[in-house]
Amino acid sequence: MWSSFVEKVFITPKLMLGYIGVMIFMAGEGLEQGWLSPYLIKNGLSIEQSSLLFSVYGLTASFSAFLSGVLTEMFGVRRVMFAGLIMFCIGSFFFLTFGIPSHNFAVMLPSYALRGLSYPLFVYGFLVYVTYEAPVDRLSTAGGIFWSCYACGLSVLGVMYSSVTLKFMTEIHVLWSALVFVCLGGAIALLVDKDAIKSKKRANSEEKTSILYLLKGITIIFEVPKLGLCGYVRIVNTLASYGFPIFLPLVLQNLGFTISQWLQMLASLWITNMITNYFWGMLGDKWGWKNTVAWGGCVGCGLTTLLFFYIPTWGGGYFVTWLAACAYGACLAAYTPINAIMPMLAPENKGAAMSVLTLAAGLSTFFGPGIVGIFIHSIGAVGVIWIYAALYFSAAIVMAFVNIDHRSFIKKKDENNPASPPIVAKS
């Protein structure tokens, strides 16, 4: 009965361990979001220094996200994930021991940047593993479970933990406690498998161990142009979600909403996203990966982005605005099958394909707030909202050129060897 439950919910026991590990790891990674910047400014950093600190963190995270796929192909899942875990611990040690207590920005900047390098290696390294371990007919579902666990750890568990512990612990002690989550999550996830991602065919490939393979995450876009199109769609995916916190709280406050109501809506948005990731993943495997992304994700996010802004602007109260926030969070989850589409566009180079995906995810963290910074003074909040909506609708058009039939992969797998196990990760 237990094995049946695991297969139904988590697909395989190995994936279940990895999912749980990622969720706990991201709880430690995300427990400081929402309060670290004000805390640092309160304790001596300037706004400009704080902004630079988080900008460099985002840059290093994007770079690491890009490399995670090809590094996993080259060195194996466990090595890459373990490297991410160690880098997080080292970065945290210097940041908390020599950076914050002495207000030494010269130490804080590189040590926090090292933390930015660390977590994509851990979580995206595991995501590459998911594309190999999960059967093709449940690949979208597997991606949905991953993002549900990721969001649960980052935006729910970590935030809830901080909201409770900050009442009786100092900020520095809460930051130190993140290492407990990270190490526990790492220990669980690293039980995932002992071998590297290699099929028998790839085990003899010298290309996968060449340093030049690092460039595969770029060159593959020219070899498989549809990957570039999907990369654009993935960038657009979370643009508004990263931009909303920059300006929407001020808009809502001017309309009579409280900051507490905004935070409740934001939390509900991500909780809804966390829950619906799993269901959109299953729907993608049934309805079609492309249809789910184009209609549920791109068109859905375009419409709900407008609703989230115009409902309160036109006089809607808290409850209907809260519903709009939840609807946006649900549609945001409909992009889940993009995690299945991209590796299957390059089945012989899944790691490189996932590097394109993870790079796009990282770039979204820049362009989302960047759109606000560039346009908010010239065209106002209304203009920014319409830019986001237009980009979502443009992504739906782009998806029309990504011709992929998930059923063909399932049929091909069944015809070739229905009883064969999936390619597993070995190191």
Image: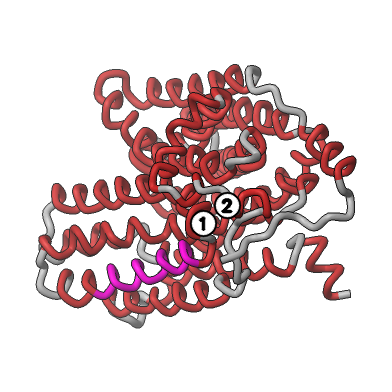
Q: Which amino acid does label 1 sit on?
A: Gly
Residue 373 against residue 56 in the figure, above or below: above
The residue depicted at 20 percent of the width and 62 percent of the height is 40
User: Magenta span: helix, strand or loop, mainly?
Assistant: helix
Q: Which of 373 and 144 is in front in this view?
A: 144
Q: Mark 2 points at which residue?
A: 128
Q: Magenta span covers which residues?
A: 79-93
Q: Where is residue 111 in the image (x, y as percent from the top left)?
A: 23, 64
In this view of the protein, can residue 261 be seen by the observer?
no
Q: In this view, does 166 lie to the left or right of 408?
A: left
Q: What residue type is labelled 2?
A: Val
Q: SS class of the residue under badge 2? A: helix
Crowding at dot 2, Cα within 10 Å, few <14 / some 14-19 / many 20+, comes out as many
Q: Residue 125 carries which label?
A: 1
Circles 2, 1 touching at the beta carbon (< 8 Å): yes
Q: Which of 9 and 70 is in front in this view?
A: 70
